[in-house]
Amino acid sequence: MKEEYDFSKGERGKFFYPDAELCLPVYLEPDIADFMRKLAGQKDTDIEKLVNDWLRRNISLIETLRQ
């Protein structure tokens, strides 16, 4: 590393986007990933769509039980 850096020509906020959406990676355990991969292949869909559908149903069930 340099001892000093010159930021005199830097522009504050150049890469700041207030509406940017952060996509967090989700890591599945190997047995779950294998199951989801096989099921997604059988249904001819993406793993992401399958997992999102399952999570939506789970959220709906939880909200139904809270009422």
Image: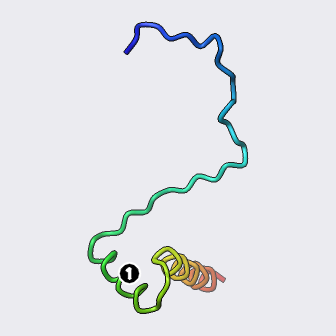
Please name the residue shown 40% across and 86% down the image. 41
Residue 20: image location, x then y, percent: 67, 49
Residue 18 placement (x, y as % from top left)? 72, 43
**Coloration mode:** rainbow
Residue at figure coordinates x 41%, y 7% from the top left: 3
Query: At 39% across and 88% down in the image, what residue appears?
Result: 39
State the residue at coordinates (32%, 77%). 32
Dot 1 lies on which element?
helix
Quarter holding the N terminus? Answer: top left
In the image, residue 57 above or below residue 13: below
Q: Judge left or right: residue 43 versus residue 65.
A: left
Q: Give the residue at mark 1.
A: 36
Residue 5 versus residue 30: which sits nearer the camera? 5
Residue positioned most to the right: 19
Farthest residue, direction top: 3
Q: Where is residue 44 in the image (x, y as percent from the top left)?
A: 47, 88
Label 1: how many Cα within 10 Å (few below 14, some 14–19, many 20+) = some
Q: In this view, does 25 lie above or below 31?
A: above
Q: Would you say 64 lies left or right of 36 here?
A: right
What is the x, y in percent for residue 35?
A: 33, 83
Count of labels in the image: 1
Specify whether 25 is left or right of 17.
left
The amino acid type, in three-letter code, at marker 1 is Met
65 vs 49, nearest the viewer: 49
Q: Kindly give the residue lying farthest to the left in the view shown.
A: 31
- Res 13 → quadrant: top right
Q: In which quarter of the image is the C terminus?
A: bottom right
